[in-house]
Amino acid sequence: MNFRKLTAAILSTTLIAGAAVLPDKTAIQPDMMTAGAVGLVGTDWCGENVQYLFTTDETLYINGKGAMNDYSSSEETPWHPNNQNNNNIPKIYYVKYVKFNDEVTHIGSHAVSGCGALENIEISDTVTSIGSYAFENCTSLQQLVIPESVSYINEHAFKDCDYLTELTIKNPYCEIKYTSDRNDLTKNTVVHGYTGSTAEEFAEKNGLSFESLGKMPAPVYGDANLDGNVTIADSVTILQFLGNNDKYGLSPRAKAYADCYCTGDGITGNDALTIQKIDAGLVSLEELPLKYFYWDEN
């Protein structure tokens, strides 16, 4: 019996009249966090290795490993009324709390759009990207924190979040897609981020108030793969990006860190060569970013 059939069999034995006791987390998926002793009223897949759980306290948990599915509209999400056969399952209009748990890496397009009663969204620090219209029309949402792990937010993610007054974007290099002919947020929204960050740029383009979290952290020049070290592996990362940036893309933060030679000129072969010089002992980390190359004649 494959994993999905086994999971379905276990869950089917625990669902009783739409208000079952939530099974132990190992009965769903070994790495999944669950809602403790709260009643489970609905579950299904919303990604290759990602499940959702509805609980009796009107909470939606997104659990598993990897990316959640992208949807073309809220009507396609499995928690939309059109896709629910059990009348006891809470409709999207009554979901008050959503938690994207550890090891989920992508919040899908239209993930919780239309959840008008949604008051709180918790995003784990494993999430790296947010799809378009992900939080569209969440009209009860007043505060949202995007963790530092998120490097990409697609367009209209916050569309018609009319009462979103506090938006915090912790990654100073996060790429935030923006459509110039449309402002998705009201003037009451205050964007919080680092001075000089993409969050500040986003606020300015949208005519929104901005409050600084402080100065941007200094780049770790040369750390193209963001592993906390500068090694020959970072040179390889840069060369892969230059060779095929569609396959070996770099996040905005990685690009800022990789630009260790003549900063501001983009990612070039000279950046990779600079890291090779560090590995060979010809250049020290303290000298980065380099403005020009020099050779030790000795």
Image (spheres, rainbow, N blue to C red):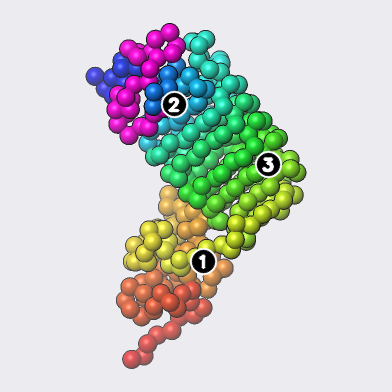
Residue 135 visible here: yes
Asked if the stretch drawn in magenta spans residue 21, the answer is yes
Please report whichever mark, 2 or 1, sits nearer to the chain's N-terminal start. 2
Image coordinates of residue 227 in percent, x first then y, are 38, 58
Image coordinates of residue 215 in percent, x first then y, are 59, 63
Please report whichever mark, 1 or 3, sits nearer to the chain's N-terminal start. 3
Image coordinates of residue 71 in percent, x first then y, are 53, 29
Q: Most prominent secondary structure in the magenta stretch?
A: loop
Residue occupying image coordinates x 60% and y 54%: 193
Residue occupying image coordinates x 41% and y 58%: 226
Measured in 3D between alpha carbons, the distance from the residue under mark 2 to the one under mark 1, in whole angstroms, is 38 Å
Q: Amino acid at mark 3?
A: Thr
Where is mark 3, residue-wise? Answer: 165
**Which mark identifies residue 218?**
1
Q: In the picture provided, is 26 more to the left or to the right than 196?
A: left
Q: Are there few (<14), some (14-19), or many (20+) residues within 10 Å of tag 3?
A: some
Q: Amino acid at mark 1?
A: Ala
Q: In the picture provided, is 228 more to the left or to the right than 112?
A: left
Q: Where 209 falls versus 258 (above or below)?
A: above
- The quarter of the picture where residue 162 lies is top right
Q: Where 230 falls versus 104 (above or below)?
A: below
Q: Secondary structure at mark 2?
A: strand
Residue 110 visible here: no
Q: In the picture provided, is 98 more to the left or to the right than 136?
A: left
Q: Secondary structure at mark 1?
A: loop
**Which mark identifies residue 52?**
2
The magenta-colored residue range is 12-35
Q: Nearer the viewer, mark 1 or mark 3?
A: 3
